[in-house]
Image (cartoon, grey):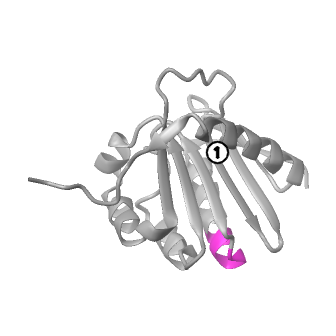
């Protein structure tokens, strides 16, 4: 199947939820997700959290990459709680602020399972245009980009905060 275009915020959110459910069904070992803030992702929706909880087992890893996580803490408290409970399988890194991201997708979700792979990319957050692909070459290109950016990032979004 070639990449299929989508348009609309609700369509993007539906595809994120479907990709997370697929990852849980397939037993994907790793998920890679990029967004400047993840504020528009359906991370506090019950369906997304149920899929993430079903997916999270020993040996699994969710790699989050963002510019900052302040908005996710404010907008997605249920996900923040999930992240605390499943800290063993989540790495969250923040990209160096001076890094130039001109060719970056607005959002990216990558998953590889026994029956294939999924690459979900949002290119335009104003018109909510993007594509979903099941092609290995699309995932490989996106993964190369993700890895290159991740090398210019540092740990962020701790599972718990220490207070005095």
Q: Where residue 72 sits: x, y (%)?
A: 37, 47
Q: Identify the residue shown where x is 47% and y is 51%.
A: 92
- Compare residues 138 and 125 and report the one nearer the observer: 138
Q: Which residue is mark 1?
A: 108
The furthest residue to the left:
164
Q: Is residue 48 left or right of residue 101?
A: left
Q: Identify the residue shown where x is 59% and y is 20%.
A: 100
Identify the secondary structure beneath mark 1.
Answer: strand
Figure quadrant of residue 152: top right
- Compare residues 122 and 113 and report the one nearer the observer: 113
Q: Identify the residue shown where x is 61% and y is 25%.
A: 101
Figure quadrant of residue 54: bottom right
| 33 is within the stretch colored magenta | no
Q: Is residue 70 above or below residue 41?
A: above
Q: Where residue 116 sits: x, y (%)?
A: 83, 66
Q: Is residue 21 above or below residue 2?
A: below
Q: Where residue 78 sits: x, y (%)?
A: 34, 63
Q: Which residues are magenta?
A: 21-27
Q: Where residue 90 sits: x, y (%)?
A: 49, 61
| 26 is within the stretch colored magenta | yes
- Compare residues 94 and 15 and report the one nearer the observer: 94
- Compare residues 156 and 3 and report the one nearer the observer: 156
Magenta segment's dominant SS is helix
Quadrant of the drawing holding the N terminus: bottom right
Residue 46 visible within the image:
no
Q: Is residue 158 left or right of residue 97?
A: left
């Amino acid at each position: 199947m070639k990449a299929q275009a989508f348009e609309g915020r609700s369509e993007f959110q539906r595809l994120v939820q479907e990709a997370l459910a697929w990852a849980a069904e397939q037993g994907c070992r790793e998920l890679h997700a990029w967004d400047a803030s993840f504020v528009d992702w359906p991370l506090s929706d019950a369906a997304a959290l149920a899929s993430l909880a079903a997916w999270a087992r020993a040996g699994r890893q969710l790699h989050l990459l963002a510019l900052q996580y302040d908005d996710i803490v404010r907008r997605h408290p249920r996900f923040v709680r999930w992240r605390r409970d499943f800290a063993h399988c989540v790495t969250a890194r923040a990209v160096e602020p001076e890094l130039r991201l001109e060719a970056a997708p607005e959002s990216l979700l990558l998953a590889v399972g026994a029956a294939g792979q999924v690459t979900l990319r949002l290119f335009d957050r104003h018109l909510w245009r993007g594509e979903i692909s099941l092609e290995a070459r699309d995932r490989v290109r996106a993964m190369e980009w993700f890895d290159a950016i991740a090398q210019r990032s540092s740990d962020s979004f701790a599972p718990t905060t220490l207070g005095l």
